[in-house]
């Protein structure tokens, strides 16, 4: 899917809509230059998930974890969450954490491990967003973690092309 947004609010709105296609356990790799709108997109995601805190860039802390308060969002969740005994299918539990990672200063698996990020990847109760995360694709594929790539391209000061 290819979408053009014409201002910040439209990218936030797209982030909100994007959440509807998630079910928990995904790692979303956000690709795009500095100032493209990666963090802005996550702000929309957070809003749709009912995150109360303001989302700010995790560039200097590597990772921020936001508690998902209420599922106003449309993340599909079953009526019997997190109960493997009830279903032979993989359990799908309600999303509890939004994890926002920014590897702008250099992608290092050791650094991700140190902040506890690796433990969140692929967890059914967690959705992870990784800015500058393209280098993680092989790592995630090898571990069979569902991965989605979102590319954001600067067209002009307010126009962005977003490919999902
Ligand atoms: N269409 C748009 N989509 C997203 N951000 C936009 C758009 N137009 C202008 N902006 C501005 O561009 C900047 C994007 O910043 P940010 O989301 O932090 O980028 P990144 O995380 O990719 O470095 C913000 O100041 C935002 O208001
Ligand atoms: Mg950012």
Image (cartoon, rainbow, N blue to C red):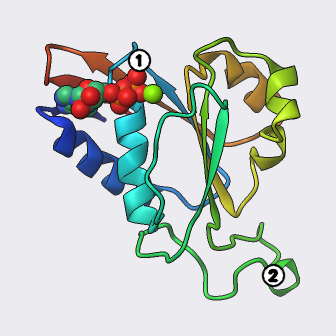
Q: Residue at x 39, y 13 (%)?
A: 33
Classify residue 155 as left or right of residue 130: left
Q: Secondary structure at mark 2?
A: loop
Q: Which residue is mark 1?
A: 32
Q: SS class of the residue under badge 1?
A: loop
Left or right position of 153 against 8:
right
Q: Which residue is mark 2?
A: 83
Q: Residue at x 61, y 88 (%)?
A: 79
List x then y, in percent, for residue 134: 59, 18
Q: For the N terminus, which image quadrant?
A: top left
Instruction: State the CA–CA distance, disc 2 to disc 1.
Output: 38 Å
Number of the front mark, 2 or 1: 1
Q: Residues within 10 Å of mark 2 (few under 14, many from 20)?
A: some
Q: Is residue 4 left or right of residue 110?
A: left
Q: How many marks?
A: 2
Give the image location of residue 51, x and y in percent: 48, 64
**Image side of residue 5 versus residue 29, left or right:** left
Asked if the residue at label 1 sits under 8 Å from ligand 1, the reply is: yes
Quadrant location, the C terminus:
top left
| Residue appearing at x 25%, y 15% in the figure | 154
Q: Report the image quarter containing ligand 1.
A: top left
Toward the viewer: 60 or 104? Answer: 60
C-beta proximity under 8 Å, tags 2 and 1: no
Relative height, residue 81 to residue 91 (above, below): below
Q: Position of residue 100 (x, y in %)?
A: 58, 41
**Which residue occupies the foreground of this view, 107 or 54?**
54
Percent x, y of residue 162: 29, 29
Quarter of the image holding residue 151?
A: top left
Residue 125 is labelled as none
């Amino acid at each position: 899917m290819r979408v053009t947004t014409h201002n910040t609010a439209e990218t936030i709105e797209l982030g909100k809509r994007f959440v509807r296609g998630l079910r928990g356990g995904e790692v979303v790799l956000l690709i795009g230059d500095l100032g493209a709108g990666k963090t802005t997109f996550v702000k929309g995601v957070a809003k749709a998930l009912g995150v109360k805190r303001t989302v700010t860039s995790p560039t200097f802390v590597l990772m921020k974890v936001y508690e998902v308060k209420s599922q106003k969002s449309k993340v599909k969740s079953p009526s019997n969450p997190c109960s493997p005994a009830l279903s032979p299918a993989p359990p799908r539990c309600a999303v509890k954490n939004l994890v926002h990672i920014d590897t702008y200063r250099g992608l290092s698996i050791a650094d991700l491990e140190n902040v506890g990020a690796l433990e969140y990847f692929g967890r059914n109760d967690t959705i992870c967003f990784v800015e500058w995360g393209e280098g993680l694709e092989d790592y995630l594929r090898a571990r069979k973690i569902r991965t989605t790539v979102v590319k954001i391209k600067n067209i002009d000061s307010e126009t962005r092309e977003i490919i999902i």
